[in-house]
């Protein structure tokens, strides 16, 4: 059996937090949480931890045993984190994913997912997009999409359509969240002739640099397009949205910071001001 290696050590003089994932070198979370800590006067140390495949539970155990206070979890360990959390929020259970863990006084592991809240806060607070009463199209049906549906429905959209290359996966999500409101599933080819006020890209298309096969004419007047991914330059989805004359286009930089702020609040009981951190991150991404 291959020995699983854990790549971290804690600072015994501070409260310790981390993000665990694989890969992890690209993570902006340490930079974001350091900015939150400086802004709010919190004394803590936050690091990125590379976890070997199959090694999440071992790394989690060790981090907790060494006195860690809490952690974020990114791909590919969010479902592992969900299973490892003793007490989970309703939104985490619906998402079958946890991206934030903290340890209670009795050592019990509490788990939540903040991705959907991060998306909604970026849209509604930072960009002043009204979701209520709007027709929303979501591209993709993977874990990233599953995690945003509950907070999205809290904003009371008129309807949500999930379009995915594999129709059965979209249909499964549609059934799971059918109690929340008007939600339908379809393939990309079935989008022809339909229009939406908000389109959210939750596929990995921007990583693969290939846009899903979307028809022209999808955007209603004053439509907003949002890519959950972020990049130093326009993603391929953002480029497509601009070619379709979208009134507003946004990438996921704000979502990244807002979901981190929600985690920070769960850990420290203080909600940081996200706008200067978003600006800092955009500047750093551009250089």
Image (cartoon, rainbow, N blue to C red):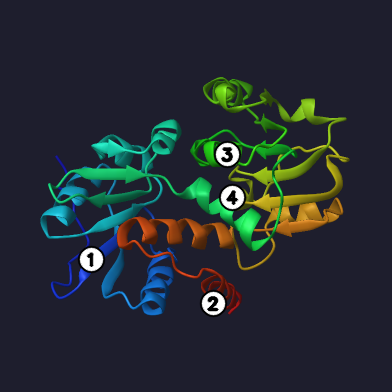
Question: Mark 4 or mark 1, which is nearer to you?
Answer: 4
From this viewpoint, is residue 170 visible?
Answer: yes
- The Cα atoms of the two marked residues, 3 and 1, are separated by 33 Å
Instruction: Determine the CA span between mark 4 and mark 3.
Output: 9 Å
Q: Looking at the image, which residue is at 60% across and 21% down? A: 171
Inter-mark Cα distance, 3 to 2? 30 Å
> How busy is the neighbourhood of tag 2: few (under 14 within 10 Å), some, or many (20 plus)?
some
| Earlier sequence position, callout 4 versus callout 1 | 1
- Badge nearest the viewer, 3 or 1: 3
Q: Disc 4 and disc 1: Cα gap in Å?
A: 28 Å
Circles 4 and 3: CB distance less than 8 Å?
yes
Asked if residue 166 lies left or right of residue 223, the reply is left
CB within 8 Å, label 3 to label 2: no
Q: Which mark is residue 280?
A: 2
Q: Quadrant of residue 15?
A: bottom left
Q: Considering the numbered disc 3 on the image, is that residue within a helix, a strand or a loop? A: helix
- Mark seen at residue 16: 1
Image position of 143 (left or right of 188): left
Counting residues from the start of the chain, the first of labels 3 and 2 encountered is 3
Viewport quadrant of the C terminus: bottom right
Determine which residue is flagged by label 3.
154
**Is disc 2 placed on a helix, strand or loop?**
helix
**Which residue is rendered at x = 51% and y = 59% of the image?**
258
| Nearest the eye: 66 or 150 | 150
Q: Are marks 4 and 2 in contact (CB under 8 Å)?
A: no
Residue at the spot x=57%, y=55% of the render? 121
The foreground one among 124 and 162 is: 124
Q: Position of residue 104 (x, y in %)?
A: 19, 49
Which comes sooner in the sequence, label 1 or label 2? Answer: 1
As helix, strand or loop, the secondary structure at mark 1 comes to: strand
Seen in the picture, residue 144 relative to 236 is either above or below; the reply is above
Q: Residue at x 52, y 23 (%)?
A: 176
């Amino acid at each position: 059996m291959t020995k699983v290696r854990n790549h971290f050590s804690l600072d015994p003089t501070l409260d310790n937090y981390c993000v665990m994932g694989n890969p992890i070198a690209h993570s902006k979370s340490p930079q974001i949480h350091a900015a939150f800590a400086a802004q709010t006067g919190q004394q803590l140390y936050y690091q990125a931890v590379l976890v070997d495949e199959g090694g999440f539970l071992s790394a989690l155990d060790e981090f907790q045993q060494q006195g860690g206070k809490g952690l974020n979890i990114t791909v590919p360990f969010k479902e592992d984190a969900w299973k490892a959390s003793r007490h989970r929020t309703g939104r985490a259970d619906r998402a079958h994913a946890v991206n934030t863990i903290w340890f209670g006084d009795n050592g019990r592991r509490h788990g939540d997912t903040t991705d959907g809240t991060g998306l909604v806060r970026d849209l509604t607070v930072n960009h002043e997009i009204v979701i209520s009463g709007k027709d929303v199209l979501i591209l993709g049906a993977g874990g990233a999409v599953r995690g945003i549906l509950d907070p999205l429905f809290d904003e009371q959209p008129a309807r949500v359509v999930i379009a995915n290359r594999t129709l059965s996966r979209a249909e499964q999500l549609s059934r799971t969240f059918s109690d929340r409101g008007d939600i339908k599933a379809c393939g990309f080819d079935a989008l022809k002739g339909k229009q939406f006020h908000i389109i959210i890209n939750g596929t990995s298309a921007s990583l693969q640099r290939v846009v899903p096969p979307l028809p022209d004419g999808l955007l209603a007047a004053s439509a907003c397009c949002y890519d959950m991914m972020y990049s130093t330059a326009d993603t391929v989805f953002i480029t497509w949205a601009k070619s379709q004359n979208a009134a507003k286009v946004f990438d996921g930089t704000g979502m990244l910071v807002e979901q981190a702020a929600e985690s920070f609040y769960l850990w420290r009981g203080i909600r940081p001001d996200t706008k200067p951190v978003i600006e800092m991150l955009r500047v750093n991404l551009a250089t």
